[in-house]
Every structure is written in structure tokens, then in C-alpha cells.
Image (spheres, rainbow, N blue to C red):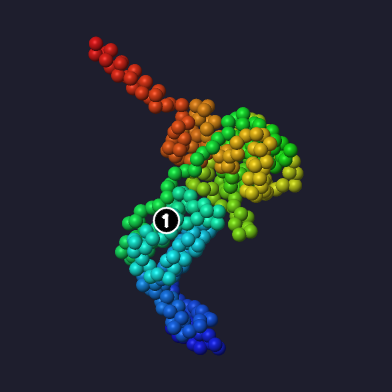
Amino acid sequence: MAVYKDGNKWRSVYRYTDWQGQRKQTQKRGFATRRDALTWEREQLNKVNADLDMSFKSFVELYAEDMKSRVKENTWESKEHILRTKVLPYFGNRKICEIQSKDIIAWQNEMMNHKNKNGKPYSPVYLRNLHTQLSAVFNHAVKYYGLHENPASKVGNMGKSKYREMLFWTQEEYSRFAAEMMDKPVSYYAFEMLYWCGIREGELLALTPEDFDFNKGTVRINKSYTRLNGRDIITDPKTPKSNRVIQMPDFLIEEMKDYIQRLYKIGPKDRLFEVTKYYLIHEMDRGAAAAGVKRIRIHDLRHSHISLLIQLGYSAVAIADRVGHESIEITYRYAHLFPTTQSEMAKSLSDLRKGEESNVS
């Protein structure tokens, strides 16, 4: 460890032994004072020794080193953005071992009272996500670095975990919308896949010709597309359950054959829909307005597909296999759509009781 005068500034050099026993060196220039250089040096020592006397900002850097390679790139980008913009400005310079539950409550109040330039607060779901990301950092410190307790866990979450309101298009509404999309084949076929297969937007945008087996009438879902920092990224699907093979209706088989044949220069591994999510949103706006149907989100087409399958009488288990959900999630999220209503349940129970009484008599 050493601090040197570097022109009008100060430079700190820190030497340490890594986990493989190799000697390493790190340094930083441009400190205004010797004291600043020594403070940085002390933080490096705390990080290497996993000393919880370090600042929260330094621990988040450790957390990033531990976790970044274990999650999807877009997942980490979302976590990092929240920590950088919503958490570090409040806790970054505090020692992680000194942050208390009362500090978490004050931060929660700040987040819940926040208004953007249009006077709009954060949504309940977003507030819950903010707290979840903060709590994850403390959990990591407790589990792997010896922090006594998680102050965020003691306080409890804020916001709500409720799903956004789900909107649906009936088959008639979708047909009116689809008719307006026929002037742009890429839009028409994209929305046909979304509505009739119930796939996610990222799954659609990752599709390639080799994913289709027209002899069997199936499409394979085994990847997802996202655009991140100006780069096209293909990842695994959202969950292991999302890896699936979907049987397509006959008319969709013929439509996708036709679409792929139009793309005569496309390779087997090339993306079929080289459009952006913003393009699909724009087309959704255009088509809904032209068709005179209510505007729904792109993801609501997936809800519309599930709703249609429920109306056709399929079970939660069968629907879950098709759309890549757990059956319990289908049951929970779409319970109000299944035909067995409370009144029908009550009638069945009444009939059961009457049957017992008649047997007794």
C-alpha cells in the first residue's frame, strides 16, 4: 500500500493477493488530497478482506463481481440501474454495517413520495422492485460476508406485487385488428404468432426458420431476443419451463410457410422478425386505432391467447405447457376466467349434501 504525489494530485497504489494466491496491483490517480487517496486505499483493503466496515458503494461493487456472471445480461442491467440511480445516492457513502432499519424506512418514504416532472409517482409494482433489489444486496452480505442482519428485511417491503391489470381482445376484436395489419406482412405475421401461439415478445423476435417444423406443424421456443446498449442479444427463455414446442393451427402453418418463402435470402439461423419492440408498439397503436378496438399492450396478446384457450375448455395444466407457465400460475392469475364460478361450486356442494340426505332417508 502506498500513496504518492502525482504532479498537483495524489495517486494511490494498492497491492494484494487474490483468491488464487497471485499478487495483484490496482491504483487510482487524480485525488485532490492525500487524505482522499488514503481513504480509497482503505476501501480497497476492506473489499479484499470482506470487511463490512466498507461503504455500501464498495459492497455493491463486490456484489456485482459475485452476481453479474450468474444472471442474464439484461437482468443485471435492470438491477444495476436501480442500484445506481435509486439506492447508491442515498446509501453509497454509508458503511454497510451501520445502515439501520430506520434508514431503510426513511429511504422508502422518499421513494413513495417521489414524483416525476409530470407529478406522477412510482407505481406500486416498481416500488416493490426497488425494495427487492436493495434487500437482495443486504441478503448477500448476510449470507456470504457475515453481516448480522438484513435491515431491509426487518422493515418489510413497500408497494404491491399485484400484476398489472390484464386486458384482452376477443377473437372478433383480434380479427378486426389483424385485417388492418395485412398491408405490412412483417407486422401481420408477427401478430399472428403472438396471438395464436401465446408466445412472449422476446420469443417472437428470436424466431428463426430452423425453429419451424412444418411437417409436424410445430414451432420450437428455446431463446429470447432483447436489444441492450445498441446490441442484439439472444438469451435463454425467461424460465426453464419456457423451453417448449408449440403445435400451430393449420392456417398458421400455411401463413408462416408463406412468410418464410417471401424472405428468399434468409438463412436457417437468421431472425425472421428483424424489427424492434418499439416498431411493434407503433403498429399496435396504428392497428387498434384503425380497427376501432381498445388499445392493449403487446403482452396482453398472450393474455388474450390464454383467455381463448380457457373459453375453449382446456385445463390450466394443458395451457401452462403451451405458454411456458407453471400451472399454479395459470390457476392463480386467470382464476376469474375459468367457467366454474362460485355459484356453480355452491350448487354442486348443495347437490352433494342432498344426495347424502336422500341416502340416509
- Determine which quarter of the picture holds residue 288: top right
The answer to whether residue 315 shows anywhere in this view is: no
Q: Is residue 348 left or right of residue 126?
A: left
Q: Is residue 85 above or below residue 361?
A: below
Q: Is residue 305 above or below residue 276?
A: above
Query: Residue reaching furthest left?
Result: 360
- Determine which quarter of the picture holds residue 179: top right
Q: Is residue 136 left or right of residue 6?
A: left
SS under mark 1: helix
Query: Residue reaching furthest top?
Result: 361
Q: Is residue 268 left or right of residue 238?
A: right
Point out residue 324 in the picture as x, y percentages from the top left corner. Answer: 51, 41
Q: What's the amino acid at mark 1?
A: His
- Tell me the residue at 45%/32% (across/down): 336
The image quadrant where one finds the N terminus is bottom left
Question: Circle 1 sits on which residue?
Answer: 131
Point out residue 118 in the picture as x, y percentages from the top left corner. Answer: 55, 54
- Determine which quarter of the picture holds residue 133: bottom left
**Closer-to-camera residue (72/172):** 172
Point out residue 231 in the picture as x, y percentages from the top left corner. Answer: 63, 58
- Tell me the residue at 50%/27% (across/down): 313
Dot 1 surroundings within 10 Å: few (below 14), some, or many (20 or more)?
many
